Amino acid sequence: MNSQEKLQKLIQTVEEIAKEQGAYWKDNEKMRKTFENCFVSTAKTTTKFLENDEAYVFTGDISAMWLRDSSAQVVHYLAFLKKYPILQEMVKGLIARQAKYIHIDPYANAFNEEDNGNCWEKDITEYNPWNWERKYEIDSLCYPIWLIKQYVAHTDAHDVFTPEVKQAFRDILNVWKLEQNHEDSKYSFIRVNCPPSDTLSCEGKGEPVGYTGMTWSGFRPSDDACKYGYLIPSNMFASVVLGYMEEFLREEYNDEAMAEEAAQLKAQIKEGIKKYGIVKDETFGEMYAYETDGLGNYNLMDDANVPSLLSLPWLSYCEKDDPIYKNTRAFVLSKKNPYYFEGTKAKGIGSPHTPDQYIWHIALTMQGLTSDDPKEKKELLNLLLDTEAGCEVMHEGFDCNKPEEFTREWFAWANSLFALFALSMK
């Protein structure tokens, strides 16, 4: 099949799965339609098969491919990879494309389909025509490793462990080790004529940090600048995927030396989190901070974008009943979190990336995926359905008092997580 025929086969397959799975809600037309629309969204509106067996998964309303978003956009397909070869081929092709991009520039968060120089803005940073945007975010490098782990777990296939993937591992290790001492890094990023959240202070280097063992991040998963350079949930995610990388390097590549590098870095990051990432709150007790600089400053908040503090069990960093996580969860789902909003129509976590009082569908879905309370999960599913503003798909953020006011008419990442959450409720 050529690339267009593959895409048609993919769309046909996901439509069939959506109808089959959606029949579970045959007595709830709104739920069934919303699930089906969200399930097909990634394949139908954001995917291209390329002629070199790679797959390009763009965000949808923006033509660029984010390493993070593209991984998250296929989460609801993972359980179906073994049964449907075209889905397996798509995810395998996506992993290959991600490895290619990481080697081109491990500091970039979003890429063009071709080296055409298209970009969000002409930023002051090291230029590469492949880059749509060069905001350095730890999670951009975490997600492709996480996706490889999911691919192998759901297919029992080991055909993704190419030399290019190993090179991507090498590039990731190099960056994360270097950014443990950010003052030694050449990375900088300046955007002109923009809000402070879109650029880095201190001539593009960000605010000063001390050594902690953790690895520095310029930006959050929201693409907003970090207030303090050690982003705790992203370092947690890095520690998880470094464990996966260590496993792959030993078992798939037989490279003990590089595997030991990954193991040591994981240990250093985890020790840094333990030493610098935990604070004691007078209301909630010991809990995780969102950011720190290693110099005594902390940012106590959570953001809707994943990795977040709320998402830690979903990322396999800890169990749902972990005491510090439970304290942290209580904090982030309270008004002490500056981005937790309660309105007349909804309550949940938003983001400084969107307007005040806007809650994110991603955050509501993640709250459900990390809950062990059936009542809470059912209420969240109903809330998601009640706030889609008649669009029968998920949005980015919506006004907690007026859900008909929202950002992004449809958002593939949010659609995928909704479909995953819905399937988990069957």
Image (tube, rainbow, N blue to C red):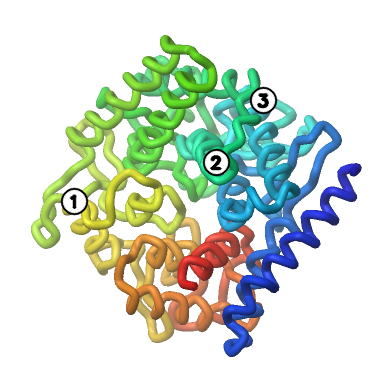
* Front residue (pair 255, 399): 255
Local SS, label 2: helix
Q: Amino acid at mark 2?
A: Leu
Q: Which residue is mark 2?
A: 147
Q: Nearer the viewer, residue 193 or 398?
A: 398
Image position of 181 with respect to 4: above or below: above
Amino acid at dot 1: Ile
The reply, left or right, for residue 292 in relation to residue 398 is left
Secondary structure found at label 1? helix
Q: Which mark is residue 324?
A: 1
Q: CA distance from mark 1 to mark 3?
A: 42 Å
Q: Position of residue 110 (x, y in %)?
A: 63, 39
User: Which residue carries the number 3 mark?
Assistant: 127
- Pointers 3 and 2 in contact (C-beta within 8 Å): no
Contact, mark 1 vs mark 3 (Cβ under 8 Å): no
Q: Relative to residue 101, is residue 115 drawn left or right?
A: right
Whether residue 387 is visible to the viewer of this picture, yes or no, is yes
Upstream in sequence: badge 1 or badge 3 = 3
Compare marks 3 and 2 and give the one earlier in the sequence.
3
Q: Quadrant of residue 273?
A: top left
